Amino acid sequence: MADFTSQPEPPRTLPWAAIGFGLAVVVVLLGVLWIASRESGSGSSGAADPYAASLKISDLRVSAAQNLVGATVIYVDGAVTNTGNKNVTGVNVRAEFKDTMGQVVLRADTPMMMTAERPGYSDTVDLNQSPLRAGQSRPFRLTLEGVPNSWNQAPPDLRVTRVTAK
């Protein structure tokens, strides 16, 4: 005679190893996407604009000041000369600050502002309001915040990444 007593089913276990592996893959992919988006953060690939070769940067000086909330602001002042044949109405610059070992500690993209002397103070003016004409040389200022203390205090490496010219 056959024994028809029901056998209890063994408890089902989830494939924890497969679930853990899947989660790890998702986390790694999200990390790679996050890092890639930070490096292209400003929408600029960092490749130099063709007209950038017509802009010569010289006489770099670095100074620092405290802003109203107590953070340190770094100013990079210099001169820019337009050796091309167009009037420049906008310039973006990539500044790379390095530590004492030559490692980049901050890479920042910022617009170049022209310096204008006013009675009793200096002001910065957007190039769109006061274009840099062909053959002209003018003082400029870059304003940067968040520069780490490990910076070597030397002027940053500057590279023109975008130029708007007419």
Image (tube, rainbow, N blue to C red):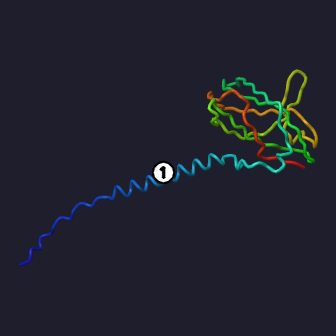
Tell me the kind of residue under disc 1. Val
Report the side of 30 relative to 7 (left or right). right
Residue beneath the point at 43% across and 56% down: 22
Label 1 sits on a secondary structure element that is helix
The location of residue 111, given as percent across then percent down, is 78, 40
Classify the position of the N terminus by image quarter. bottom left
Which of these two is toward me, 139 or 100? 100
Q: Residue furthest top?
A: 120
Front one among 80 and 28: 80
- For label 1, the residue is 27
63 w.r.t. 164: above or below: above
Question: Residue placed at 86% from the left, 45% from the top?
Answer: 54
The residue positioned 80% from the left and 32% from the top of the image is 141
Residue situated furthest front in the rendering: 101
Pick the residue in front: 89 or 76: 76
Viewer-proximal residue among 76 and 99? 99
In the rendered image, the residue lying farthest to the bottom is: 1
90 relative to 69 in the view: left or right: right
**Horizontal placement of 139 versus 97: left or right?**
right
Q: Quadrant of residue 158?
A: top right
Q: Identify the image quadrant of residue 72.
A: top right
Residue 20 spot, x, y in % from top left: 39, 53
Please state the total of marks drawn on the protein image.
1
Residue 8, image x and y in percent? 17, 64
Classify mark 1: residues with Cα within 10 Å, few (<14), some (14-19) or many (20+): few
Residue 95: x %, y % from top left: 72, 38
- Residue 12, image quadrant: bottom left
